[in-house]
Amino acid sequence: MDDNEKRIQLRKEAHSMIDEIGNHLSKLQDVVANATDIATLTLVLNTIEMCNSEAAKILSSPPPADQGDT
């Protein structure tokens, strides 16, 4: 697979991940809209913080194409 094909594949995977994140955020929005207690809202906030932490790990790691070269 050449570099262009790798970029195309990574872009497809990124779009898929973005769609999945959007679905999760939509579900969280529904939960928040229907929340009647602090525990539910705390759970939502903790979930968002976890997602942010995972996103930071992904963004700080080298691109997948570079990982196998070492």
Image (cartoon, helix red, strand yellow):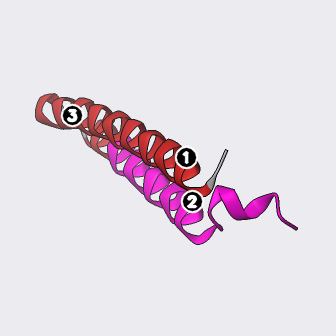
Separation of residues labelled 3 and 1 (CA atoms): 32 Å
Range covered by the magenta-colored residues: 42-70
Separation of residues labelled 1 and 2 (CA atoms): 21 Å
Identified by mark 2, the residue type is: Ile
Main SS class of the magenta portion in the image: helix
Magenta segment: does it hold 11? no
Quarter containing the C terminus: bottom right
Q: Nearer the viewer, residue 36 or 46?
A: 46
Q: Are marks 3 and 1 in contact (CB under 8 Å)?
A: no
Residue 26, numbered circle: 3
Mark toward the start of the polypeptide (2 vs 3): 3
Q: Position of residue 55 (x, y in %)?
A: 49, 58
Q: Are marks 2 and 3 in contact (CB under 8 Å)?
A: no
- Alpha-carbon neighbours of circle 3 within 10 Å: few (<14), some, or many (≥20)? few
Q: Nearer the viewer, residue 58 or 6?
A: 6
**Mark 2 — residue?**
58
Residue 44 in which image quadrant: top left
**Mark 1 — residue?**
5
Identified by mark 3, the residue type is: Ser
- Alpha-carbon neighbours of circle 1 within 10 Å: few (<14), some, or many (≥20)? few
**Where 3 sits versus 44, above or below?**
below
Give the side of residue 69 with respect to residue 57, left or right: right
